[in-house]
Amino acid sequence: MAVERIARRLVLTTRGGHKRETNDDETVFASLGDQPGEVVASSLRVGDFLGIRYGGYSWPTQPASLPELPYRKRYGSEKAVVFPAVMTAELAFLLGAYASEGHTTRANWSVIITNSVLHILQRVQAAWSSCFGLTARITHQVDRCPGVVVSSKRLVEFLELLGCGSRASDKAIPEVVMASTREHVLAFLQGLALDGYTANTGAGKWAICLESRRAIDSLQELLTRLGIVNAQIDKLNRQFDKTYPELYAAGPWGQEVCRLVPFLEPDKAARASEFLERVYTGVSAADVIPGLSGRELYNLIPRGRSGRNGRGTGRQQFAYLMDARTRHVSRASALRLRGIDGVELPSWLESVLDESVHFAPLISIQTGDV
């Protein structure tokens, strides 16, 4: 009697923090050291390159439906709450602001969102009213960041139902946000960006640090759907001697995040404006395409005609591709060759460039039965 094989669930993690879940008998687009293609997931090893497609996501066209709390009678003077049936832009912003700078206190059934900018606090205050019919108050306490406080047991229960988390370490991006339209995701990200920043040194970047790895992983998925090339790193906070995950988008990708999700705080908006003024003329040489040697790419360039009236093809400017020390060809080189008359790239390479597929080495392959 044949024994039915039980598929194993694999969690593939790349150097940039991207995670891909798949069964071991399913195929993924990857390189095992040769030309990238569809390979069976069970054949992957740490160090192999996984292809990650940025963009190309089919966004929902209708607002996501919100879950309903079980009905119960109000207790005593408990405040009435009006719960929306579907996601809205202002609710998405409010959930983003909560994910970045909010927390709940079950002792008095309060939700607090902090920020130092008054007009942002006023917007949050207005959002609690327009989304839930609740009256919130702005508080200013000595030695504490100003905040917006709203008290409602039903609201706290609703945030728990959404899976928002109650404090920084257990925050999560709700599934209803992950299933939202592009417009609502951008509104959520604008609220979340209250915890973000830009850096104009080095390559320049847009970045955000969150204590919750789960929230960072979900945020990475959202930026990937938006077509933003991104990666995770761990950053040490020396003041608290604690490491936090950071998600960043460098160079022109960081600039695109700034355009899609403008900062609301004046100081951050000013720094982002300086960052947006930078001009990037190339693509990072660290963005490589495995399975293609420099010599193979160089040989695709047609030779020029010799003689007084001959015409060159600029082949000599790509002589660096012949360097035997080069392990992988950069995406920048492939894009440059693509613009030369007479160069015909392999169909798989054309697809990689057209579909914005980028590669990152696997650093972890975890398994579990399903």
Image (cartoon, rainbow, N blue to C red):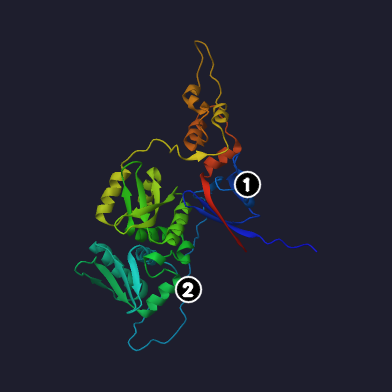
Amino acid bearing label 1? Glu
For the question of whether residue 23 can be seen, the reply is yes
Left or right: where 88 falls relative to 145: right
Amino acid bearing label 2? Pro
Question: Is tag 1's residue or tag 2's residue first in the polypeptide sequence?
Answer: 1
Residue located farthest toward the front when viewing the structure as drawn = 241
Residue 321, compared with residue 86, is above or below; it is above
Please state the horizontal and vertical placement of residue 112, each as a whole percent of the image.
31, 71
Q: Mark 1 points at which residue?
A: 38
Residue 16 numbered mark, or none: none
Q: Mark 2 points at which residue?
A: 67
Q: Dot 1: few (<14), some (14–19), or many (≥20) neighbours within 10 Å?
A: few
Residue located farthest toward the top when viewing the structure as drawn = 308
- Which of the pair 290/47 is nearer the observer? 47
Residue located farthest toward the right when viewing the structure as drawn = 1
Left or right: where 43 falls relative to 68: right
Q: Dot 2: few (<14), some (14–19), or many (≥20) neighbours within 10 Å?
A: some
Mark 1–mark 2 Cα distance, whole angstroms, equals 38 Å
> Helix, strand or loop at disc 1?
strand
Residue located farthest toward the bottom when viewing the structure as drawn = 76
Please state the horizontal and vertical placement of residue 223, each as a whole percent of the image.
44, 53
Please state the horizontal and vertical placement of residue 342, each as a whole percent of the image.
55, 27
Please state the horizontal and vertical placement of residue 332, each as a whole percent of the image.
47, 35
Front disc: 1 or 2? 1
Q: Identify the residue at image location x=40%, y=46%.
A: 253
For the question of whether residue 82 can be seen, the reply is no
Q: Identify the residue at image location x=43%, y=38%.
A: 284
Q: Quadrant of the N terminus?
A: bottom right
Q: Quadrant of the C terminus?
A: bottom right
Q: Identify the residue at image location x=46%, y=57%.
A: 217
